[in-house]
Amino acid sequence: MAHSEGRISRRNVLKNLSIASIGFVVTTTSIADPANASGGATAGGVYLLSAKQRYNERVKAGVKEFIALSTSLEAGSLDATKDFFAKDAVGGWKDASSAGYLLSNAFRRSSTTPPDSLPTVKKWKAFAAELEVLQKALKKKDSKGALASYQKSEALLDAYLESVELPPVIEMRQ
């Protein structure tokens, strides 16, 4: 019998064929979960959608606080504006500044595009640069200069809000 296993015979061919068939059936019909790869954090723009949702509210809160400054600046008071720039929490400049930049960066269409070349980032940086001028006026206690800078920055803010698909300043005042 030991000699019959090495020979090519009908019985050995059928035996090997049946073993191979069983192996094939087991490997192709085994119950294994398919691999569901996400494709990375930005696959399909899902990350961008969540980033927009995540930063929209923080930006809106900061914009509403910023808009509220007009009354005190028009009255010649700088205290509320100083508080806005010093505040770390949602609604203050520090939080709105980071959320605004991140929101503008969420409008990229390609991961190879540098952030500074995005129109939304350019508009955010123009607004933020004018707020630096406003802060300098605050340090000099120049209420007229602060008001002028505020009014200029409000126009820049409107351009930014439009680019990131948020309501304009006039709608957020309500």
Image (cartoon, helix red, strand yellow):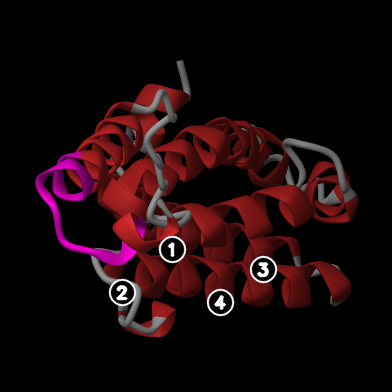
Residue type pointed to by label 1 = Asn
Question: Viewer-proximal residue, 150 or 115?
Answer: 115
Q: Is residue 50 left or right of residue 145?
A: left
**Of the image marks 2 and 4, the number of the one nearer the N terminus:** 2
Instruction: Nearest to the eye among marks 2 and 4: give it.
Output: 2
Residue holding disc 2: 118
Task: Between label 4 and label 3, give the one nearer the viewer.
Answer: 4
Please name the residue shown 15% across and 49% down the image. Answer: 13
Q: Earlier in the sequence, mark 2 or mark 3?
A: 2
Residue on which disc 3 sits: 134
Residue 7: image location, x then y, percent:
23, 64
Element type at mark 2: loop
Specify few, some or many for label 4: CA neighbours under 10 Å numbering under 14, 14-19, or 20 or more: some
First-in-chain label (2 vs 1):
1
Does the magenta-highlighted stretch encompass residue 11? yes
In the rendered view, would you say 125 is above or below 147?
below
Q: Which residue is mark 1?
A: 105
Q: In x, y percent, where is residue 140?
A: 85, 77
Question: In the picture shown, does residue 11 fall above or below 103?
Answer: above
Label 3: element kind: helix
- Give me the C-alpha separation between circle 2 and circle 1: 7 Å
> Label 2 amino acid?
Leu
